[in-house]
Each structure stands twice: as C-alpha cells, then as structure tokens.
Amino acid sequence: MQNFDVVIVGAGISGIGAACHLQAQCPDKTFTILESRRQSGGTWDLFQYPGIRSDSDMHTLGFNFKPWTDAKSIADGPSIKRYLTETIAEHDLSQHIQHEHKVLSADWSSEDATWTVTTEHTGETRQFCCNFLMMCSGYYNYDTPYTPDFKDQEAFRGEIIHPQHWPKDLDYQDKEVVVIGSGATAMTLVPAMAEEAARVTMLQRSPTYVVARPDQDKIANTLRKLLPDSVAYALTRFKNTQLQHFMYHRMRKEPQKMKKGLIGLVREALGPDYDVEKHFTPKYNPWDQRLCLIPNGDLFKSIKKGKTHVVTDHVDSFTENGVKLTSGEELEADIIVTATGLNMQVMGGSTFSVDGRPINFADTVSYKGMMYAEIPNLIQTFGYINASWTLRADLTAEYACRVINHMDALGVRQCTPRLRAEDTNMPLRPWIEDFSAGYMQRTMDLMPKQGDKDPWRNTQNYALDKKIIRKAPLEDGALLFAKLHLKPIGASASEAEQNAA
Ligand SMILES: Cc1cc2nc3c(=O)[nH]c(=O)nc-3n(C[C@H](O)[C@H](O)[C@H](O)COP(=O)(O)OP(=O)(O)OC[C@H]3O[C@@H](n4cnc5c(N)ncnc54)[C@H](O)[C@@H]3O)c2cc1C
C-alpha cells in the first residue's frame, strides 16, 4: 500500500494541470498521478489520425500558468502533446506519474478519512491510500469508441477504421475513402486525407454548423512581439474568453439571426452553385450542438478543389464495395472511416463506494459541477462544452487546492457536500442542459444530476464559474468540513452539528 495526501487519476491535460496547481498551492502535500496508459497526454496522445488538431484556440486550451507561444492558435495534435510534455518536464512531474495503473475502484472510509484506490498494474492488483482524490480521467472510454451496428458490415472487402484506433501505417494514397460522420473529427480528417486520397466522401446523416477561422491569431502574435509572453498570453486569453462568451450568448439569444449569418458565410465560401441548404444547414439552432471550426476554411477549399464530396443521406447497409444509402445510391470505397464518435464514461469506468455503500453517480447531485453530495474528499474535472476544457480544469484544480488548504487551516480531514434543508425539494436536472449532441444524449442517464440553484448547478458558464468557484466562500453551509467521521445523512441535527468543525 502506497500512501499519499492526494491521488490524481489521469495524466491528460486535467491531471497534469492539477499536479502543477497542487505543487504551487499545496507544496507540502505528497501526491501521485495514476495513469492507465503507457504515455501521458490523454486525448493528445491517443488520437493519431491525419490532421488531428484542436478545435478551440490554444490560448484558452492551454494552462493559465504556461503561455502558449506557437504562432498557430489552432494547433495540431503533436504540438499540443509537446506542450504537455514540456509542462511535465518543467514541473518535474515524471517522478510522480505511475503509468499502466488503471484505477478499478475507489473506496472511502469515514473512520480513517481515507480513500483506498485499487489499480490493475501489468496483471497485478496494487493499492494506494490518500485523503483527497482528484478524478482527472476525462469523459470517454479509451478502449471502446462508439460505433453503430451497420447492416452487413462484414460484407465490406476493404478496411474499416475508427479514428480512435488509427493504424499508424494506413496507406490511403490514391484510394477512395468514405468518412461516416460530420462532427469535429470528420471535419478534421476529411480535408487532411483528401490531400493524398483519390477522393474523400463525407457521409453525414444531417448537417452541422461549420465556421471557418484563421489558424493564427494576429492580435496574439502581435502582442507577443511587444510584451513578455506571460502578459501577452494573459491578454489574449482574456480577449478570447470574452469573445467566446459574447458569441455563445448572442447565438443562444438570437438563434435565427445568427443561423442566417453562419449559413451566409458558408454560401460565400462555397459559391452560389453549391447546395448549402442540403449539406450545411442544420435543423437545430447554433450551439444546441458544438460548432465545428475549420482552420483557414480547409474543408471548403477541399470541396472546391473537387477532392472532397459531401453526401447527406443515411446508411442502409455496407456492401462488398462500399456503402449503400437509403436513397438507393451506392458509394464506392477502399476504406471506410467510422467517425461516429465517443462512448462517454463516468469517472474513468472505476467503481466507487462510501463506507461500503456503492455509489451510482446517476443518483448523486453535483456540487458546483465538481463534487457530489454525500461523497467526501472527491473532486472531478469536467470541462466546458461551449468553451475550452482547460478553463474549467484550471478552476477545478485551484478550487481543490483551496479546499485542501482550508481543511488544514481548520485541522479537519473531511469535507462533504450535503443538501441543506432548503435544497431537499429542489428540482433535479440533467448534468448538461440544452445540448443535443448524440454522444451526450446517449449517456446522460449515467451522469450525475444538477440542481436549479447554486451551489448545485453545473453552469457551463466560465464567467459565472469564476464567481462561484474562485471567489465564493468555501463555507457556504452546503460543503461541510468535519474532523473525522461526518454522520451519514439521516443523523440527527445535533449529532451532525457535533461532528461539524
Ligand atoms: C479528438 C478530440 C479533440 C478535442 N479537441 C478539443 C479542443 O479543441 N478544445 C477543447 O476544449 N476540448 C477538446 N477535446 C476535449 C478534450 O478531451 C479535452 O480538451 C482534454 O484533452 C481533456 O483532458 P483530460 O485530461 O480531462 O482528459 P483526457 O485527455 O481524456 O485524459 C484522461 C486521462 O485519464 C486516463 N484514465 C482514464 N481512466 C482512467 C482510469 N480508470 N485509471 C487510470 N487512468 C485513467 C486516460 O488514460 C487519460 O490519459 C477534444 C477531444 C477529442 C477526443
């Protein structure tokens, strides 16, 4: 059994960031990072498909403590991985990361105010103890992507590939490629593969909003020439968060007007003869699902060159030579890429218990979108669907450090969110509201619930989160700090009060 003050699960953006914040703000705490894979970097190491890149700007996808200094603000996967590797080196984190440790379970004992974390390591079971657990395990299953069952899939003679498991040596030079899907991955893959392939067809059931943006931020690059990196980065980050916030809220407030504007830009890019109505006019409003950003309009350029075709139809079945559509048309293919998405997963697929009681996260209520009612000393990082993930990862890690330091200041070992009397009849809502993307909807019933008032909301609003996470007092009557054993719910008020610090 290895003992630490804090265990961090996952060595992706969130886990690496959490460790850096912990080192800076809680320098006396011992910690380890348990990572199931052989490499660090999470998403930015796993995905290796052609053209892999961010779809939000690196001035907000980067950490608040480490400036992004590359000229491109929409960055390719290897550059993001390099940024993370640099962070690991600069903070001497390698010694703290234990690779090939897949966390299977985490069990809390109120008696000892301790989590026992059980991992699988090269076929063996290992255990770790800690007082505070930070789950930075991302939001999707690394082993099994989402692939619908296509009829007669086995009939296809060519290769079928999912972008999550890209074969390094895949040869697609001069081949006919069909990419099924129209999410961020398909939008990235299609123009990248079209450079070498004979032809790429993007087959979509329904259109997505697509926005072309330059991959370089001129203001950021000018600021960097004039100011120290840290100042230029902070200014650009501020500019981008304000701009994202403004645009998101305008789109939600005036969807019809904004829809017209977005579709108008696509028409301008593709010309009057292109059927924008059919292929690029979604039925839903902007930001009901994530907008797809294409750097320098690469997808539109590829369509205009005749290298990329968009087909809006449904798959009927696979055939020997490609895909048969419900319209009766057949698409020939040597390679079919199923860019059909991710399988969302709660807490890295690990099981949890509190004092022997198994936890089903679908039955829990989120506290500030980071902790859960009746689950002590646990913080999870879950980013934004409408802004860069790391904005929230930084806030979450800062908050965890504040909580840990506050427990020390009070001389207590336990903090637990608990619904107050006035919260008990609060209506419960889905973990994320007003977001219809398939990958979210498929698994929403597995996710924790949120309340309709603070501190129980998962706001998905960075400006608001800065207030309720960074600025709000820790002792709000809902987060209870206790010496050791906080009585389970149902204990009389006086007993609970005796326990509270
Ligand atoms: C292709 C792609 C592009 C994206 N682009 C953007 C973008 O441009 N902007 C944006 O904001 N977001 C983007 N996202 C979302 C993206 O996942 C986040 O931005 C960010 O990388 C998440 O970091 P993370 O560390 O929280 O999770 P991950 O990157 O998923 O890392 C989680 C880590 O935890 C480990 N882990 C999981 N379960 C366990 C376990 N049980 N035991 C031990 N270790 C475990 C994993 O192996 C992994 O290393 C993208 C996602 C994908 C898939």
Image (spheres, helix red, strand yellow):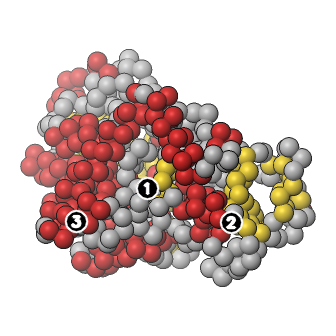
Looking at the image, residue 467 lies above or below residue 304 = above
Three-letter amino acid code of the residue under disc 3: Thr
How crowded pointer 2 is (Cα within 10 Å; few <14, some 14-19, many 20+) is rated as many
Q: Where is 173 relative to 161, above or below? A: below
User: What distance separates the C-alpha of mark 2 from that of mark 3?
Assistant: 35 Å
Q: Position of residue 306 (x, y in %)?
A: 69, 63
Q: Nearer the viewer, residue 141 or 191?
A: 191
Quadrant where the N terminus sits is bottom left
How far apart marks 2 and 1 lie (CA) works out to 21 Å
Residue, disc 1: 213
Residue 268 image position (x, y, % from top left)? 54, 48
The residue positioned 36% from the left and 40% from the top of the image is 247
Mark 1 vs mark 3, CA separation in Å: 18 Å
The residue to which callout 2 is attached is 307
Secondary structure of the residue carrying tag 2 is: loop
If the image is split into quadrants, where does the C terminus sit? top left
Query: Is label 2 in contact with label 3 (beta carbons under 8 Å)?
Result: no
Q: Secondary structure at mark 3?
A: helix
In this view, 104 is above or below 458: below
Instruction: Work out whether residue 304 or residue 208 is closer to the camera in this orientation and state it.
Output: 304
Please state if 351 lies on the left or on the right of 11 as rendered: right
Please tell me in which quadrant of the rendered image residue 479 appears.
Answer: top left
Q: Is residue 337 left or right of residue 71?
A: right
Callout 2, which amino acid?
Lys
Q: Residue under circle 3?
A: 222
Position of 18 relative to 415 (above/below): below
Residue 113 visible in image: no
